[in-house]
Amino acid sequence: MINISHMISSSKFKAVDFYRKFPRDLTEASVSGAWLSIATALAMIFLFGMELNKYLTVSTSTSIIIDNSSDGDFLRIDFNISFPAVSCEFASVDVSDALGTNRLNITKTIRKFSIDPQLRHKAIEFHSEPVPHVSQHGDEVDDEAVEGSVSLNSDSFAKLSQEHPILVVNFFAPWCYWSTRLRSSWEKAAKIIKERYDPDKDGRIILAKVDCTEAVDLCKRHHVQGYPSIRIFRKGSDLWDDDGHHEHESYYGDRDTDSLVKAMEELVSPTPLENQKPALEKNRPAPLTGGCRIEGYVRVKKVPGNLIISSRSGAHSFDSSQMNMSHVIGHLSFGKIISPRVLSDVKRLIPYLGRSHDKLNGLSFINHQDLDANVTIEHYLQVVKTEVVTVKSSHESSLIEQYEYTAHSSLAQSVNMPVAKFHFWLSPMQVAGILDSILYNTIRLMKKMEIGKNI
């Protein structure tokens, strides 16, 4: 027997369709549909590019605000300046400002190195201490004093320096006030030493003098720039090397007769007495060359002021017509020195940052004496502080501070002693920038990864 009800239910089940059919115009390709797809794809690419560009673009905001610096009331100036024609013996770094501050011959944070005209220097640092501000002189000025010292020129100097173990020479200028004050004491001391150490019988020491207005080349050869300069030459030690450098000593003790005689006795005596100061405290090596490289830093108040480099002494005179303040600036910057690594990272995001923080580096300012004598070289610097705040997250940020400056320089004749002068004005306003550092941190991470791969 056939089950008719089962057959009927089976036929109904086969007629049911569980898959919905899409309209025919949606499943078949058409030209209009192709253009619509292309337009949609281009729109997606455009929107993706816009978003990527926004992500890669550093967000900065810049404003001008009152300078409320976190580095206090003082500003540091770092410098490295070479003077081919200024002796380290008298080179002085001075600072003055609009508030009346006047600091002379700063030495604590300054180093000096003797250099030749080609800016080459000896590795030995030239020490400025001890140099008295004022030397004691004898009260008497006797124009008819007995000539006790020997007058020298280039020829007689070479001969006498080989005949006596110790030759002490007074390099003077007749027009010099200090040379005039020294003359009487020097001649009396020379006479006393001559009597105690007869040149013909003993000859261990002899005192001489050189007029630098007549023996010009001899004085230049020994780098005499201040008058009077008392130099001590020891036989066999005053040798010249391949660069023309030579070694001898400069005397910086008192200049009265008794002090001079005592100092000469100490030079001859192999060991000083217990109650005597060693001669080394009065003497120090003379400059090896006629030039000087000065490097270091000074701290100045944040007001208009001057950084001045010149030849200075409280007991010497200088011929201003022969002073040449030509110089080469190796480095000059204001504020804290930013490490090259940090500066490089920030400059990749803000290219203009750091272009003017050392604007004078590597520049030469040479006086070829076309303007005659007494030429002062001046630099006018307008200093502005720039702060960059790098936002690392909503709770973390870092601050980069940098001082940048503009510079204008000039050469001008002066009625006073020629100097190299840096006038600086600090702007009361500062430039503040805020940097969104999502990309900044990404770059730092990529650099670290590159370093890791290289290692």
Image (cartoon, rainbow, N blue to C red):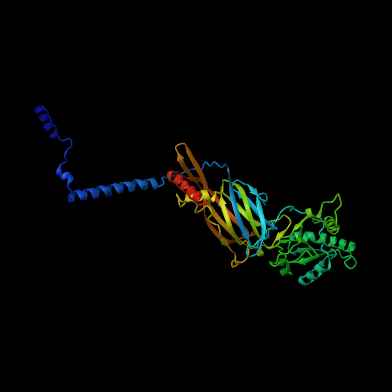
- Where residue 295 appears, x then y in whole percent? 63, 54
Question: Would residue 383 be seen by someone viewing this image from the given angle?
Answer: no
* Residue visible at 48% across and 43% down in the picture: 389
Examine the rendered structure and indicate whether residue 179 appears above or below residue 35.
below
100 left or right of 135? left
Q: Nearer the viewer, residue 193 or 11?
A: 11
**Position in image of residue 317 (x %, y %):** 71, 59
The quadrant of the image that shows the N terminus is: top left
Task: Classify residue 23 as left or right of residue 154.
Answer: left
Image x and y of residue 452, in percent: 50, 49
Q: Nearer the viewer, residue 247 or 334?
A: 247
Number of labels in the image equals 0
- Residue 186 picture quarter: bottom right
Percent position of residue 76, x then y: 59, 48
- The residue at 39%/47% (across/down) is 56
- Quarter of the image for residue 330 reads bottom right
Left or right? Give the position of 111 relative to 184. left
